Image: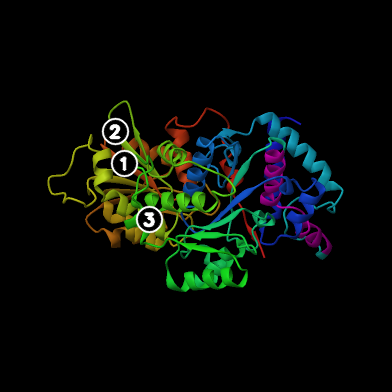
Amino acid sequence: MTYRDSIQFLYDLRLFGLKLGLENTFKLAALAGNPQDKLRFIHVAGTNGKGSTCAMLESIYRAAGLRVGLFTSPHLVSFRERIQVNRELIAEADVVRLVDELRQQSRAGFPPAPIGDSAGTTTGEAGRRDACPTFFEFVTVLALRYFAQQRCDLVIWETGMGGRLDATNIVTPLASVITNVQLDHQEWLGRTRAEIAAEKAGIIKPGVPVVTAADAPEALEVIEHTARHRHAPLIKLGQASRLSAAGVPPALPLLGEHQTLNAALAMATVKALREKIPVSDDAIRIGLETVQWPGRLQLVQTPSGQTLLLDGAHNAAGAEALRDALGSAAMGAMISRRPVAAEAEPGRPDARADLILGVLQDKDWRQICQTLAPLAQRVLLVAVPSERTAAPELLRDACVKANPSAQVMTCPSLADALKQTAHDPFIIITGSLYLVGEAMECLGLAPPAPSERALNEWTLKK
């Protein structure tokens, strides 16, 4: 196999969609020798902030001298971003080798699957398809095998969707982390915060400590109940940690008040595990001061002096976090190179910004438009590079209603929107991580290579 062959094989696995359940993952892991049994994990779930918290935990433990695996999703550009050791992306040669090995091993335990469109298949064909590993199940076990072969001291392990039935939930971690519980993926995880919290709390294991920054009462009640039932020590941060996060380094490079809360959550997790993994205060400080997590409130200065802000505010809570960050003094200082509107109020977003917005159809796009459109003088709506994109025309009315004074327009592509804003001082690109990944390619922020963003596509199989 070549690397392109391996990536094509992973593309083909999209036929099997995304299924919630652990049976296939346990089975595939057993065929691969149960690599999870050779590793230690911190398992991270939550609606928002999972990736940032994982990045902070990885950075802290790496600063402490550990060999740290990092498993996250989705990727911005390259599939290899999902699987890293000490922030080195998995090599193409390792992807080829592991895909080939795992593909051959899976043949011993799974029925041959029909290939092609699911329309018109027989009941037997559909059954064989449902019994086959999905892309995420396959990649989860591939990552486990890689981390075991790399002899990682610790793996920072992010859930894909939910937690209870997510493929990552075949591990027993040293600690479980639940960042927060917001309304997202309601069609699959539940319509209320309590229902969604039950899915997130599914990662809590008997006797394993759990750390959470969730503060919505209905969600926290579910997490508390699950922790009690499983005799898992519970550490709650809540919004009070915003006031008690004095230990978070002031030089935290990730912008936004929500990142201070994520940092406090990471610190609480590290301290809860100090008896098992000693980490000094200096390592915590260095890890937080040097953490990197692209595409999340990432400021980019172009040679022409233009400032761009890239942020994957992909749901309503993420949009609110972006709005709050834009109104903060820290953000104002970071973007002070751009002209400031005379009428701008201290602590308020500068309405002279241009907003390039693309949202997925299955998100709360109305609320996202309502939150973000008032931040700009001009809103340029584009399609997200995804089969699940919301049509720009669909977003237009919502943005006009939210900000009647703004110029709202649809664009045929992100490249066209960037061209139309090429001479404007401050541009915000947001609404979806898929769009942020495309922007990084357009702006030359990603290595020149064939894009693998389409691997993020999925259809849930119930």
Q: Is residue 160 left or right of residue 39?
A: left
Q: Is 273 situated left or right of 294 in this image?
A: right
Q: Is residue 299 magenta?
A: no
| Residue range (magenta) | 124-148
Q: Position of residue 58 (x, y in %)?
A: 53, 42
Does residue 141 belong to the magenta stretch? yes
The image's mark for residue 97 is none
Query: From the viewer's perspective, is residue 349 above or below residue 68?
Result: below
Of callouts 3 and 1, the N-terminal one: 3
Task: Report, in whole angstroms, how far the alpha carbon at label 1 lies from the one at label 2.
Answer: 8 Å
Using the image as rendered, state which of residue 83 and residue 67 is in the foreground.
67
Q: Is residue 98 visible?
A: yes
Kindly identify the amino acid type of the residue bearing the numbered disc 3: Ala
The amino acid pointed to by label 2 is: Gln
The local secondary structure at tag 1 comes to: strand
Q: Decide: is 102 above or below 405.
A: above
Task: Point out the residue furthest to the front here.
Answer: 275
Please give left or right for residue 62 compared with residue 106 in the image. left
Q: Which residue bears the numbered disc 3?
A: 319
State the residue in front, 341 or 335.
335
How crowded pointer 1 is (Cα within 10 Å; few <14, some 14-19, many 20+) is rated as: many
For numbered disc 3, what is the local secondary structure?
helix
Circle 3 Cα neighbour tier, 10 Å, few/some/many (<14 / 14–19 / ≥20):
many
Residue type at tag 1: Ile
Q: Is residue 252 above or below residue 96?
A: below
Q: Which residue is mark 2?
A: 306
Instruction: Give the prevailing secondary structure in the magenta stretch.
Output: helix
Could you tell me residue 139's position as x and y percent?
A: 68, 46
Q: Sequence-wise, which precedes: disc 3 or disc 2?
A: 2
Residue at image position (79%, 54%) is 27
The label shown at residue 427 is 1
Contact check, label 1 and label 2, Cβ < 8 Å: yes
